[in-house]
Amino acid sequence: MARSSLSQSLPPTSKKASYATAKKDEIVLEFDQPVAWIDALASQFYLDGEAGQVASGRVSGNLLTLKLTAPASAKSITYLTDKKWDPKSLLYGKNGLAALTERAPANRTSS
């Protein structure tokens, strides 16, 4: 199976998570394919296991930028938990497949 055919049949996977600036009020998640943002997704992200820290998001190609409610020093970011998730609020890739639950380190600043 060709690589492009394989990627069309796989859910989006995050490749990297990092703070956008030294201020640490935004986190950028890089995915292996473009993703689609809806405002309800803000409640599906957790910083160090804590909900309510993502105010909004925006997408540019494979990059999802999360605007935080306040600067943070979280060591990890998690998408979806078994505690609270809504099938109407899932992160989808350009191929229509939902991203899987993930936990990624968020301790670097982008340059």
Image: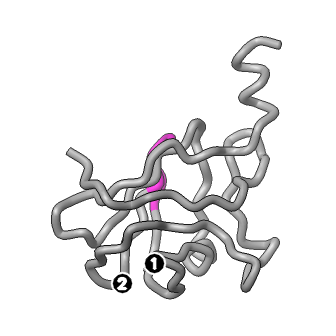
Split into 4 quadrants, where in the image is the N terminus?
top right
Image quarter for residue 79?
A: bottom right
58 sits left or right of 107 in the view: right
Reading the image, the residue beneath label 2 is: 69
Answer whether labels 1 and 2 touch (C-beta < 8 Å).
Answer: yes
Residue farthest to the top? 2
Q: Main secondary structure of the magenta part?
A: strand
Is residue 71 placed above or below 20 in the rendered structure? Answer: below
Instruction: Kindly identify which numbered label has been placed on residue 54.
Output: 1
Q: CA distance from mark 1 to mark 2?
A: 6 Å
- Residue at 36% of width from left, 73% of height from top? 74
57 sits left or right of 40 in the view: left
Badge 1 marks a residue whose secondary structure is strand
Split into 4 quadrants, where in the image is the C terminus?
top left
Does the stretch in magenta take in 80?
A: no
The magenta segment is 58-64
19 sits left or right of 16 in the view: left
Circle 2: residue type = Thr
Badge 2 marks a residue whose secondary structure is loop
Circle 1: residue type = Val
27 sits left or right of 37 in the view: left
Of the numbered discs 1 and 2, the one sitting upstream in the chain is 1
- Residue at 25% of width from left, 54% of height from top? 109
- Residue at 49% of width from left, 41% of height from top? 61
Q: Position of residue 54 (x, y in %)?
A: 45, 78
